[in-house]
Image: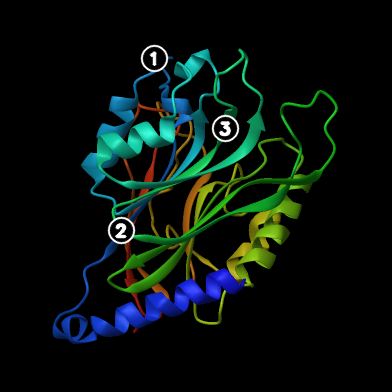
Amino acid sequence: MARRSTLLALVLILLGSFAPIAAAATPPALRIMTFNIRSGTGEDDRLDLARTADVIRASGADVVGLQEVDQHWAARSEFRDEAADLAALLSMRVFFAPIYDLPPLSPGAPDRRFGVAVLSRLPIVYTENHLLTRLSTQDPNPVPKPMPGFAEAVVLSWIGPVHVYVTHLDFRPDPAIRATQVADTLRILAKDHPGARQVLLGDFNAEPAAPELAPLWDRLHDAWAGNPDPGRTYPASAPAERIDYITASPNLRVLNAAVVNNAVASDHRPVLAELGSGWPGD
């Protein structure tokens, strides 16, 4: 917490030096995307990170939260460092937060990691890989326990520092683990300083009205709320569920939101939103 406080104090000083410029014009919208990339593999089962990058590039997103990212994980992704490769293809900064960190399959190879990531065109001034309660998919007899893979990156934007969180909640039909993960998430978000701008992105594996997600809506607003379109994101070829989200703290205004019409790069469609500073209705 001391490191975070020191870094954010520096950020606020830097922002203060730009105040005359910021006051001269209304800041542009901050474009945020969430995208479950399925390890760069589409519903056609073809690995193509360039195709994934094309979807992100075409969106014009400033910050992207990625789920299901491989880092030297398996043959399915050619043991590539997908977070680094996408960052290079897009000329963006990157923070990778592994859920799993396993020994290599062959001596001398890098460790095998799988998790979530943040891509950003904007400076990243702080990162942390938080713990959430999980049931491991790598353990044949898993029990709930704290595991990493909940990413936080503080980005320095023209509307001020924004805490960008990226998550991937449990996929199982039983909502119990997701409910615990939501409680963990809210405890972590509450540690930020009062008034912090917060964005939570990810694949929640539940529809908006699911009871286990209800506590989130007391702290954050769903960027899709009020949109007459159902906003379904999964499966990409014929979306039937809305399980991919951009959510924000009340001091960020949602200017618009859209599901990106992509049915080939992954089995999820990405969600894109434009955010502005200020309280809804200001």
For the N terminus, the image quarter is bottom right
Q: Which residue is mark 1?
A: 46
User: Which residue position is annotated with label 3?
Assistant: 114
219 horizontally vs 235: left or right: right
Report which quarter residue 136 is drawn in: top right
Q: Nearer the viewer, residue 107 or 176?
A: 107
**Amino acid tagged 3:** Phe
In the displayed structure, 203 sits above or below 228; it is above
Which secondary structure, mark 2?
Answer: loop
Residue 118 location (% of width, % of height): 43, 48
In this picture, residue 2 sits left or right of residue 247: right
Q: Amino acid at mark 2?
A: Leu
Question: Which disc is residue 122 wearing?
Answer: 2
Front-most of residues 42 and 281: 42
| Residue 281 is at least partly visible in this image | no
Residue at (69, 66) in percent of width and height: 187
| Residue at (24, 85) in percent of width and height | 19
Residue type at mark 1? Arg
Figure colour scheme: rainbow
Residue 21: percent from left, percent from top = 16, 81
Residue in front for this viewpoint, 46 or 235: 46
The answer to whether 177 appears left or right of 53 in the picture is right
**Counting residues from the N terminus, which is met first, the one under dot 2 or under dot 3?**
3
Q: Secondary structure at mark 3?
A: strand
Q: Earlier in the sequence, mark 3 or mark 1?
A: 1
Is disc 1 placed on a helix, strand or loop?
A: loop
Residue 266 percent across, percent down from the top left: 41, 28
